[in-house]
Image (cartoon, rainbow, N blue to C red):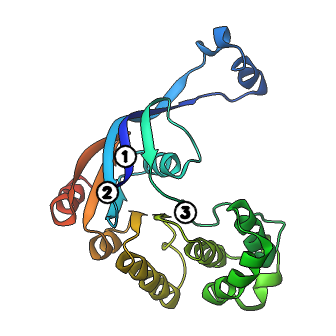
Amino acid sequence: MSMIKLDHVTKRFDMVTTTKEKFKLLFKNQSKSVKTFTALRDISLEIGKGEVVGLVGINGSGKSTLSNLISGIIYANEGNVAINGEVAIIAVSQGLKNVLTGRENIRLKCLLLGMDDAEIERRMPGIIDFADIGDFIDQPIKKYSSGMKSRLGFAIAVNVDADILIVDEALSVGDQTFYNRCIDKMNEFKDEGKTIIFVSHSLSQIKSFCERVVWLEYGQVRLDGTTKDVLPEYKKFL
């Protein structure tokens, strides 16, 4: 059963820098003169239920763009994206509002995910316990370290009942104890048969956690196969 299917997907971004240029995009006859950047080009990819797939590539290769397409944050210019299930994306401080406290951010993100007050109250203790940031839970996010933001963002995302989980460099900060807790949670998801996309520059993390690796280069799939086949080639490239 396919949870994710991309068919000849291309994503371009308009290269505008001024308000005047942005205004011109409102008119079709003006938009032709605006430069574009192709972040993904003709991507065809299928990920099945329960697969744990590592996504690798140097900065600018299209990893975050692909993650955002799958999660529905952005849309493709060409091709089809079919997603079968709910998607949660975990990224360092992704979606957190600096002026709100940790507790308020939990409530806001859960509301945006469609939860009612009763469900939020039920999930709140588990999220706070997993984040393990003590009294900072009632402090504004702007006072958090990057590690604290990562803890909170991860805790919120993993307490959402999603079918597809995208982990985007979320394990790159934080101490070893929290890292082990996150890996334990990821392994729980694997055992439950959830589909996981693991975006990381840490090849050791990819090797220990993923059975399959997709290597992106300049917005295209350079190689897609088993971890033991793809990672050695990617290491040579690096």
Q: Earlier in the sequence, mark 2 or mark 3?
A: 2
In the rendered view, would you say 206 is above or below 34? below
Q: Position of residue 212 (x, y in %)?
A: 25, 62
Q: Secondary structure at mark 1?
A: strand
In the rendered view, would you say 2 is above or below 62? below
Residue position for label 2:
1
Q: Earlier in the sequence, mark 1 or mark 3?
A: 1
Residue position for label 3:
88
Q: Secondary structure at mark 3?
A: strand
Alpha carbon of mark 2 to alpha carbon of mark 1: how far?
A: 10 Å
Answer with the quarter of the image where residue 174 lies: bottom right
Which kind of residue does numbered mark 3 sit on?
Ala
Quadrant location, the N terminus: bottom left
Mark 1, Cα crowd under 10 Å, few <14 / some 14-19 / many 20+, is some
Alpha carbon of mark 2 to alpha carbon of mark 3: how far?
A: 19 Å
Marks 2 and 1 close (CB-CB < 8 Å):
no
Answer with the quarter of the image where residue 115 lies: bottom right
Q: Residue at x 52, y 67 (%)?
A: 162
Q: Compare residues 66 and 36 and report the one nearer the observer.
A: 66
In the rendered view, would you say 209 is above or below 55? below
Residue position for label 1:
5
Which kind of residue does numbered mark 2 sit on?
Met
Q: Is residue 218 visible?
A: no
Q: Is residue 142 visible?
A: yes
Q: Residue at x 25, y 68 (%)?
A: 211
Marks 2 and 3 close (CB-CB < 8 Å):
no
